[in-house]
Amino acid sequence: MKSSRFPDSLVLLFSLVVAAQLLSYVLPAGEFDRQAVGEAGHTREQVVPGSYEVLADEEHEPLAPWAFLTAVPKGLAKAADIIFFVFIIGGAIGVIRATGATDALIGAAVKNLGGSPIVLVGGMVALFTIGSSTIGMAEEYMPFIPLLVTMCIALRLDAIVAMGIVYIGAGIGYGCAALNPFTVIIAQDIAGLEPASGWWFRCILTVPCFIVGVHHILRYARRIQADPSSSLVKNVDYSKGFDMPDDVRFTKKRAAVVAAFGAAVVLFVIGIELWGWYLLELSALFTGLGLVAALLTGMSPNRVAAEFKKGAGELTTAALLIGVARAIQVVMNEAMITDTVINGIATLLEGLPAAAAAIGMFLVQSLCNLFVPSGSGQAYVTMPIMAPLADLTGVTRQTAVLAYQFGDGFTNMIIPTNALLMGMLALGRIPYQQWFRFIVPLLIKIYLVAMAGLVAAVLIGYGQ
């Protein structure tokens, strides 16, 4: 198999660590004054506009030549709470997946909704959107590509429709995520916001994005049903290789696991809103959910341990990316150039209305996602700059997080550096060029909705 010429995400992030150090020898060190804002017990530091000053040479020291090496373990240490949270969430989800409950739920939906293209598309996109919006499901959807391709072909549709159902749902779920622990929770933590705060507005924005996404798929589906020769994959052979999974029975035990998951999500929201739960309590909640799922399905302790380790292990790459991405900020902070970069970007946006600044953040995040397709990794690269930048441009930090979510989630539907996207396309035998032709018109419409959402967020003072 020929390896990709594009650098791996870890290579890119480590290169950015080195670049940050090199930049420190060029940019002047400087800093803003900061002040505490917020209520007692929920304060955070905010930069004071107009207070940036360049530091004299005697007020700081240049970085040692090996600083970029020591920054990596420092970054891992500083991101330890999020890294452990990611491991625990991954382990708990691994146990839940092993019960077969998520597979059975999606399989039952396909079976019951498959009689009508409209119901199939709307129902399945909704299911995938909710899964991504709540617990950050994405990789878990990959096994259902062959299943959905099989169903779509039977309905005189094609693999593009199947891929659209899965990945448009996931993209909207990530872009407008209400509770996603791998993106929104991490970004809000970096921005000094309460976890999952502002979820109501993101849920509202999910609706128009969902409608636009479903309409786009259905319009294409109707076209190829009327004229099969208009299919973008008409020259691809789908005569074999697309079989149903072995076991997608929706048993009582699996239904109980789904019910427990729903209850945990409700408790998740209540705990954050009423009791100020944070990463410690959320980790405990997901650990408990994994144990409950195991008890409901009679899973042995050794199997639970094995599946937990497997699920946590699958997120090792994500954990490493988080740590190395945090190392970029370590280098910039030690060199005292973080505020210099923030001041430079703020100067470019100076004089722009807050709404235009928010849209600018969204476009910057979209560009960053091409190079750092990991949602959590991108949060650690960009949010330390975007959060204080929001303070300087009259944009709330909650809106800055929303711009990050849009830039990450929606762009993931098209960037070729996204390993999951490329893997799913390969599984569905869909050439990237054909997917590109299908998804670009949708992204234009989604981007317009997102920009309107950012303008609305600015007008209502979202997150104040």
Image (cartoon, rainbow, N blue to C red):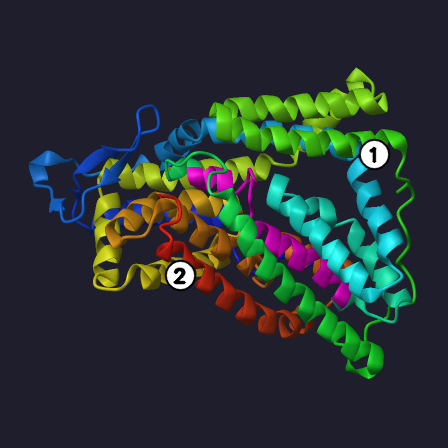
For marks 1 and 2 on the same chain, the one whose residue lies earlier in the sequence = 1
Q: Residue at x 27, y 38 (%)?
A: 333
**Left of 259 or right of it: where is 346?**
left
Q: Residue at x 13, y 45 (%)?
A: 51
Residue wearing tag 2: 455
Q: In the picture shown, does residue 288 fall above or below 460?
A: above
Identify the main secondary structure in magenta: helix
Snapshot quadrant of residue 32: top left
Q: In the picture shown, does residue 37 fall above or below 402?
A: above
x and y percentages locating residue 202 in the rendered image: 52, 49
The residue type indicated by label 2 comes to: Val
Kindly tell me whether residue 195 is visible in this rendering.
yes
**Left of 400 or right of it: where is 125?**
right
Residue wearing tag 1: 255
At mark 2, the secondary structure is helix
x and y percentages locating residue 334 in the rendered image: 25, 35
At mark 1, the secondary structure is helix
x and y percentages locating residue 131 in the rendered image: 67, 44
Q: Nearer the viewer, residue 367 or 133?
A: 133
Residue 169 highlighted magenta (yes or no):
yes
Q: Nearer the viewer, residue 168 or 273?
A: 273
x and y percentages locating residue 53 in the rendered image: 11, 45
Magenta stretch in the rendered image = 161-188
Residue 115 highlighted magenta (yes or no):
no
